[in-house]
Every structure is written in structure tokens, then in C-alpha cells.
Image (spheres, rainbow, N blue to C red):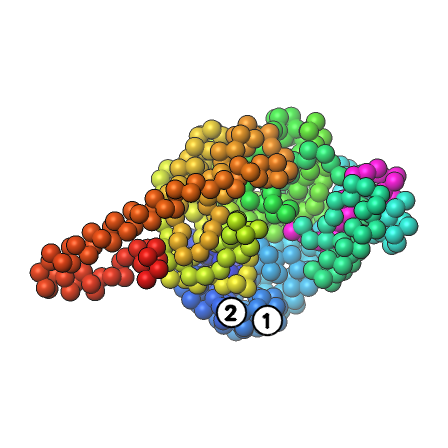
Amino acid sequence: MIRKILVANRGEIAVRIMRSCREMGIRTVAVYSDADRKAMHVLYADQAWHIGPSPSSESYLDMDKIIKVALESRADAIHPGYGFLSENAVFSQKCQEAGIKFIGPGPHAISQMGDKITARKTMLAAGVPVVPGTESAISSEAEAIKTIHEVGLPVMIKASAGGGGKGMRLVKKDSEIKSSLRAARSEAKSAFGDDAVYIEKYIQQPHHIEFQILADQHGNVIHLFERECSVQRRHQKIIEETPSPILTEEVRQKMGEAAVAAARAADYEGAGTIEFIVDKDLNYYFLEMNTRLQVEHPITERVVGVDLVKEQIKIASGEKLTLKQEELKQNGHAIECRVYAEDAANNFMPAPGKVTHIAIPYGVGVRVDGYIYEGFEIPIYYDPLIAKLIVWGSNREDAIERTIRALQEFKITGVKNSLNFLQNIMTAKDFVKGNYTTHFIDENMEHLMDNDPCKDECEDMVMITAFLEYLARINKAAPKEATSLKNNWKDYSRIRSVLKL
């Protein structure tokens, strides 16, 4: 039985995992770098251990340090969250060797699905549709040219060990083949230490749809339906929703069955995601498998009514799945918005800094997973994701309306953020219609970058007016009361940020 879990991560996902652990009566251990000494996951955990300098290579990616802390803190298991070491087969193996349960699949499944070429071969053998392309790594420019002519332009050159859009190039013309191949290989080598690439036919007007799966140690595998993930920028998801607005019940059922078959073929254990690319005619093809918890897992939790982190822990403890496929259903509609500390006007550059004020939206169907608080300094060293807004409605229209309201109420000052950009996505005609593709952001950029020049100024005027009222109260107050008001100046942190005080 698992009694203590070390969470080998940071930010909102670390806090989210710890909350489920607390509900289960499981103690938690946080690890942190120099930059995260005052981070929320450090404050929330039962124990916190320092593991090194701010760069992730010297802290959150240091396997030996993390395992050493797990042993010294007497943790029974390690939950990797997402990113960092979550899909690292070597880390999974090291945990096994140290006698610590890795909450996720074993090293073989991670390696098998982490290598995109091996994953393609596995899916072909299991009868799961894959995008037409190569079945092995491209060894030379001549082979790449020959293969591309056989498959037909346009094609995607992809890193075999890749993810997150790195080592990926779209080739539309013969003249682009050699330069794209070199660029993809170079980027793949830099990002993953492996320059192996393969070629896939590029699907026109693509939708990115993924299926959540759970598999226990006893051969039971289920899916928890799909998530539409086509709102992307630079191959990074920004907004996800479930159910997908384009799938029919027939296609949904077939894709779910294919997702289960894919998990079985990988001899999988734990929570994972089978990602598909879907064309305009609803033909679907296996894209890749993420052998971890996804950023967007909360919308599945909201629609299906299952805590995926708790299910991960139960599976890691050796329990059988109690969820039955025929009993699961989708209830209502959920949308997730990823809130980033970034400057949209400056090519979406990360915008770390001190949070001077934050107002979280509340109300029916609204959930926020985040880790920032007033006075927290967002580090420059890590992903700029600072919060996730998860909204549920009885149908898609209700969910969109509620998301717009929640985004309007969500306020963060002190750092640039993507809240206004997300509001614009919600009101874009293509998004409202529901038939958008992965090209949505490029095709709607003018609308998405439209900032109301009066919006921030009006909010600033409200703050200034409140500040003037505060000064007037001090002037009119008796000496003792005036002193009390001045001492409570910290309550006016947002006014101070607006007035640059």
C-alpha cells in the first residue's frame, strides 16, 4: 500500500497531484530548486527537499538526486506529473532498481511508445490506422527525396524521439526537402540527443484528437473518451475541449476501440493518451502515445466524473480497475484554457516576474488549477504555464459562455499573460462553430491579437479612483484610525502595481 509519494515536478501539476494524495490520506514529498524555494507546491506538501540550482538540468531532471530524496524521505512511490522525467524510461528503470514504485508505465512501454518509429510499427501490427509514411528512420537525403516522392507532397519530417513540435518540419516543395531534413535533424539532436527522423504524409485540414486510456496490471484497459486539441500554436496546445465538436458517435466508438487496442499492443500500465490526427472526412490515424498524465486531463475528469490521479495511484498499488467501459459516459461539455505568463504582442515571449495581484474566478462549473499567488516571483527557467482554467457546462454553448465569463473575472497583474488572447479565441467565429483545425490560430490571428485599448486603461482608472478614495479616508479619519489605514497599505497591492509604487 502506498503511504507516501514524492512528486517529482513543480507548478500547478505538483499541487494538483498533492491534492488528490491528501484526499486519499497519502503523505507527499515536494522537491524544489533554488528558484522554487517559496513555490506553492513546496508550501503545500507534507515535506519539502531542496534538490539543486534553478536550471532544471541541475534539479528537476537530476534522476539520482530525486531518487536519493525518495529513499531518505522513505517515500513508497514517485509521481512524475508531466514533462521533466515523466516519459523517461531510464528514470522508470532507476526507480524499479531502487525499490520505489514509478507511478506510470514500465521502462519498456515508455521506450516503445517514446520512439515514434517503433510506435508506428507497433500500431501497424495491432491493426491501428497510421498516417502513410516511412516505417524506419531516414538514413540519407537521397532516401528522403525518394520516399517523399513516393508518399507525395506535402509531408512532415518528424523527430523519432520528439515531442512538443521540436524536430518537426513541413515540406511543401521539392526545393525545401534538403534544408528541412537538415533543420529537423539538427533540432532533434539538440533537443533529444537523437537525430533520427521519419516521414509522414501531411494531412490537410487536420484535427488533433486524443483518447484518454487507463490500464491496470491485470490486463484491463478502458478509454475515457476524447479531447479535441486542435487549438495550437507552434504545435503546442492552448485550448482543449471534450466532447470533440466534430465526431459522430460511430467514429467516437471506433476511435475508442482503436485507442484500447493501441494500449494493449504496448502492454501498457497506468494513465496514457492515444493521439490521433483526423482529416476533414473523419478518417483517423494514430499520431503518437503520451505515456503520462496530460496537461488537459481535468476536462476528462469533469465530463466523465473520474479523478485520474487517484486512478493512477490505485493502479500503481496493484488494484484492479473498478470502472467498466459500458458504464462510462460523457456528461455535458468541458473546456480548458491554458494561462501563460507570456507577451502576445512580443511574439509570445515568456514574461516572468512578480505577481502583484491575482483574482481567481469562481461560480458553478469553474475550476482553476494553478500555482501562483500574490508576491510570487515566476521563474524564468521553466515553462510559462501558470494556471489552467477548466469550465463545465450542460452543453457546448453553455460551456463557451461560462468560459468567457470566467476569463473576464480572471485577473493577474504584475506579469504579462494570455488571458485576453484566450478571450478572443472564445469569441472567434470558427471556434464558436466548432469545426476548426490545427490551423485555427494562423487563420484567425488578426482577431486573436485584437486588444481593446480601453480595457486596461478603464481597469487602471478604477484602481486610481479607489486609491484616491483611500487617501480621502485617511485625511478625514481621526489620527488613530488614519494610522491603522496606513498600516494596512499591503491590502492595496493591486493599486500599487497600477501606480508603479
Image spot of residue 238 (x, y percent): 55, 44
Image spot of residue 414 (x, y percent): 41, 57
Q: Which residue is mark 1?
A: 58
Picture quarter with the C terminus: bottom left
On screen, 420 above or below 434? below
Q: Quadrant of residue 174?
A: top right
Residue 24 visible in image: no
Instruction: For marks 1 and 2, give the CA distance.
Output: 8 Å
Residue 86's label in the rendered image is none
Residue 377 visible in image: yes
Task: Report the residue that reaches farthest toward the left.
Answer: 478
Could you tell whether 484 is left or right of 337 in the image? left
Density class for disc 2 (Cα within 10 Å; few <14, some 14-19, many ≥20) is many
Could you tell whether 142 is left or right of 233 in the image? right
- The magenta stretch is 147-164
- Towards the viewer: 370 or 50: 370
What kind of residue is marked 2? Ser
Q: Are marks 1 and 2 in contact (CB under 8 Å)?
A: yes
- Towards the viewer: 415 or 2: 415
Secondary structure of the residue carrying numbered label 1? helix
Q: Which residue is mark 2?
A: 33
What's the residue at 88%, 54% (across, down)? 140
**Between discs 1 and 2, the one toward the N terminus:** 2
Image spot of residue 393 (x, y percent): 44, 33
- Towards the viewer: 57 or 470: 470
What's the residue at 45%, 61% (across, down)? 353
- Towards the viewer: 425 or 72: 425
What kind of residue is marked 1? Glu
Density class for disc 1 (Cα within 10 Å; few <14, some 14-19, many ≥20) is some
What's the residue at 60%, 32% (across, down)? 436
